[in-house]
Amino acid sequence: MMRGTTARLSESGGALPPGAGPVGHKERGDQENANHLCVAFADVVGFSAMMHEDEQGTFQRWTGLREKVILPLLEKFDGKLVKSTGDGILATFDDAVAGVKWSLELQSQARKRRQGLSLRVSLNYCSVLRDGNDLLGDGVNVAARLQEHTSPGGVILTQSVQDEIEGLATYETTSVGPLKLRKLGKLFSAFQLKTDGRHLQDPTPGVTDLPSLAVMPFVNLGGNQEDDYLAAGIVEDIVVSLSSHRDLTVISRSSTLAFARQPINPKEVGEVLGVRYLITGTLRRSNDRIRISAQLLDTAIGKQLASLRRDFKARDMFSVQDEIVETALVLLLPEMHSEERRRALRKWPSSWSGYDNYLKALDLIGSLKPKSFELARTHLNRAIDTDPGFSSPLAWAARWYSLRIGQGWSKDPRQDSSTAADLALQAIRIDENNALAHATYGHVRSYLFGDFDTAIEHLDRARKINPNSSTASLLSSVTLSSMGRCDEAVTAAERALRLSPFDQWLFMHYVFLGIVHYDAGNYEQALSWLSRGIAENDRYTTAFRVLAVTQVALGDELEARRTTQRLMQREPNFRLSDYKHTHKLYQDPHRAEQFRMRLRQAGVPD
């Protein structure tokens, strides 16, 4: 738990005079009486706007949440309902710890309902005055005003509540004060209770802050009821596909249903759902044609980042549904990731969260510039240390070691191979459903250890977990090729490129296509793809090795020797004897020997 350094509060929530100390939980003893309570306020974010758009639906969702979640939880934690305030409730607890437990469970269950209602909760342990069934007093006013300063899904506490839970390892808070509360005219210490990192507007160190996204119900512009099912099916498929990306928080479809048939205000919806991005869309039937359109919106600024439009014949609508989903991901996701990188780079280094360090590392790794590459490992370490439960930085750290060996920068390839495998396994242990982690471990097992059976098991698992992962398809392609499954390898590499045509690692996609075409004996195609890869990034030394052997296979030994010269400029210490031990090229040893023989013909030193 992080302790605040601001002035402590009196029991009414105000700042104590100099020299006065707070009355601790254990010290109060007999001083406590029925007039000293933990006051809790909970209200719905954006309630007025939602009522304006859908009065009946919003009312039903709110009353359902109140009757099925809020009130039963009050009973569970011995709380008492004082009154309902229309869009919220005022309640009390004899014990502040019980109030904290209630607020955490309330926010958890409210999120699980996924009905588009976000709550803000505030707690103050204070003296109160009773007026019949109502409560009065400065402390009640503090609790009421305090909730305005927490984010959707958040819980905010006064110093007096912080004192009650201090020393209890179950709860973690961070100081957000001193705050000047509306109409109260003085400063108050306040603390945000850690509930779920997605709902904190200003992530503190230790919070991953993954980008969050909601797919809104597509609007059927044609009015044909049969088309409603198609639109709903497309949205559901997009949500399922996006949920397979472990670097993204995706709100379930049931959360967004309340916004069906409503005009979408990105900023308001983003605040209510607690998301950074929205995908909105329309479906229109015209005679025998159907048009699908979709947009990616940044909720913070209301800006459209990307859009797509897809026309097809009505009779084909179900057969092309998967293609529509794939197209949506291909055209919209890269722009979101680009925006995330731009957002991270605009931040001061001291404000980077685990996710921001992760993004920075990916940018630096992809450059393949030695100094930048080394700095990338620093950022990955920070990401791992900041949020040990975020598995993707571990997977990329494994790929970092693999690339370090491939580029000839490793001083101890055997140790680095072992480290790469260990990191990828750690990522899998943290998150069994992380496709990136499984794909990376599979690639490491084949490329560095020659354990192709284990490799393909994990690569297949990765593609099953996330069929739309370009990385899983890309890394699968070279292992399939190494096992002699060349047709499957070409298909996987082509799919990887189709899934990520604007990838910052486009050079690697081209090079891997060159590798699999070389292995399949398609030397002219291999030459074309490898040349394109080198044009994109001429620091990736694998490209030069495969280009050289391809040129030998085509009988152009003179050009192969020129390629080798470029290879040796990038990797001056490259030797065939070392390469044989550090790179496990093929399951068939004869193919591996032929590859090394062609490198020798191209002038690579033994």
Image: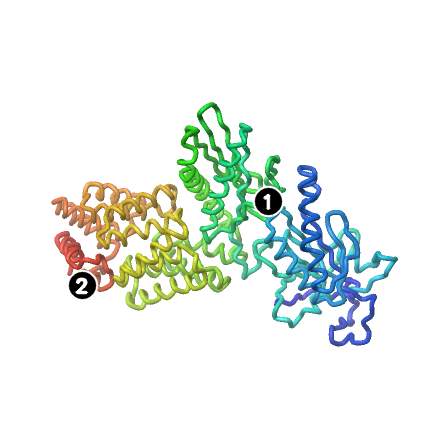
Check the image and report above or below for 92 versus 321.
Answer: below
Numbered disc 1: secondary structure: helix
Residue 9 as seen in the image, left or right of residue 598: right
- Would you identify the image quadrant in which residue 126 lies? bottom right
Residue 201 seen from this side: no
- Numbered circle sitting on residue 117: none
Which of the two discs, 2 and 1, sits closer to the camera?
A: 1
Judged left or right of residue 284, residue 18 is right
For this orientation, the residue located farthest to the right is 131
Q: Residue at x 61, y 65 (%)?
A: 172
At label 1, which amino acid type do we have? Gly
Q: Is residue 324 above or below residue 204?
A: above
Q: How is the image coloured?
A: rainbow
Query: Around disc 1, counting alpha carbons within 10 Å, would you say few (fewer than 14), some (14 to 19), or many (20 or more)?
Result: many
Q: Residue at x 28, y 58 (%)?
A: 406
Q: Which quadrant holds the C terminus?
A: bottom left
| Residue 173 locus on image (x, y percent) | 63, 63
Viewport quadrant of the N terminus: bottom right
- Residue 508 image point, x, y percent: 31, 48
Question: Residue 552: x, y in percent?
Answer: 14, 48
Q: Is 16 on the left-hand or right-hand side of 548?
A: right
The residue sitting at 45% across, 53% down in the picture is: 360
Return the disc, 2 or 1, that comes first in the chain's sequence.
Answer: 1
Residue ID for mark 1: 270
Dots 2, 1 in contact, CB < 8 A: no
Q: Nearer the viewer, residue 144 or 3?
A: 144
- Where residue 361 appears, x then y in whole percent? 42, 55
**In terms of depth relative to the viewer, which is nearer, 573 or 47?**
47
**Mark 2 → mark 1, Cα distance in angstroms:** 57 Å
Q: Amino acid at mark 2?
A: Ser
Residue labelled with disc 2: 577
